Image (spheres, coloured by chain):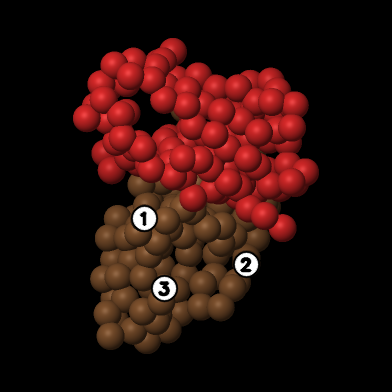
Amino acid sequence: ELKVEQNPLFLSMQEGKNYTIYCNYSTTSDRLYWYRQDPGKSLESLFVLLSNGAVKQEGRLMASLDTKARLSTLHITAAVHDLSATYFCAVAAMDSSYKLIFGSGTRLLVRP
Amino acid sequence: KAGVTQTPRYLIKTRGQQVTLSCSPISGHRSVSWYQQTPGQGLQFLFEYFSETQRNKGNFPGRFSGRQFSNSRSEMNVSTLELGDSALYLCASSGYNTGELFFGEGSRLTVL
C-alpha cells in the first residue's frame, strides 16, 4: 500500500530565510505532485514531476524528485509572507495516474 | 477557460439524510475524481470516473457513490449521513497525459 510522508508538518520561518519540505513515499510511482492550499480554499497545482532527477522552479519555489530514494523536496528560497499556506505532496498510485495519495501537508507560516 | 465547478459550495445536513454533490469538469476533460478532506484523515481518494465508468474506488463504505454523465459532469452521493462525513469534498478533473489534476473549490458539508 502506497504511503506518503511529509515533514515537517508545521514550519514557522522568517522572511528571507530558506527551507526545505521533504516528501517520502513507500512504493514505486512514476509521478509526484506538489499542491498549495490556502485556508478555506481549494488545491492549487504547483508542480508535476514525472521522472527521476526532475527539477522544476517557479518563483521562490523549487521542487525535485529522486525516484530511487522515493523522495521529493520542495525548497523555499528567501521566503515571503505570501508563501504562507499549506503545501501537500501527492503521489500517483501505480494502478491509476488519477488516484493520488496525499501526504499530511506542511503548514508554512512566514513571519515578518 | 472555466475551471472545475462544484455545487453547492456549502451545505448543512442532519444525520441520516442523504446528499448529492455536483462537479462540472474543465471543458474537454474526461476524467473526474473525488476526494474527501478532513482535519483528522487529511485528503483521501474517493473514486475516479472516465467516460461514465468508475475506474478506481477508495476505501470508503458503500454509502458513498458516484456517477458520471455523458457530458463528463459528475455527481457523488452520500446516503445515511453520519457526523464523520462532515468534510470538504473536492472534485478534480484531468485531461492530459501527465495526469495533472485541477481541483474545484469544493463542497463543504456539515452534518449535525
Looking at the rendered structure, the secondary structure element under dot 1 is: loop
**Which residue is labeled 2 in the image?**
A56
Task: Inspect the image, locate mark 2, and give the three-letter code of the amino acid beneath it.
Answer: Lys
Residue drawn at x 22%, y 30% is: B112
Colour used to depict chain B in the structure image: red
Mark 1 or mark 2, which is nearer to you?
1
Tell me which chain appears brown: A
User: Badge 1 sits on which subunit?
Assistant: A
On screen, residue B55 versus residue B20, left or right, reads right
Whole-angstrom CA distance, mark 2 to mark 3, is: 17 Å
The one nearer the camera, A85 or B51, is B51
Going from N to C along the chain, the mark reached first, 3 or 1, is 1
Q: Where residue B11 sits: x, y (%)?
A: 36, 37
- Relative horizontal placement of residue A38, taking residue A112 as reference (left or right): right
Residue A25 seen in the current view: no
Q: Chain of mark 2?
A: A
How far from the left and from the top, in percent, is residue A31?
A: 62, 46
Q: In percent of the image, x 30 and y 70: which residue is there?
A: A109
Residue at mark 1 shares a chain with residue at mark 2: yes
Which tag, 1 or 2, sits closer to the chain's start?
A: 1
Q: Would you name the residue on which mark 1 appears?
A: A40
Residue receiving disc 3: A83
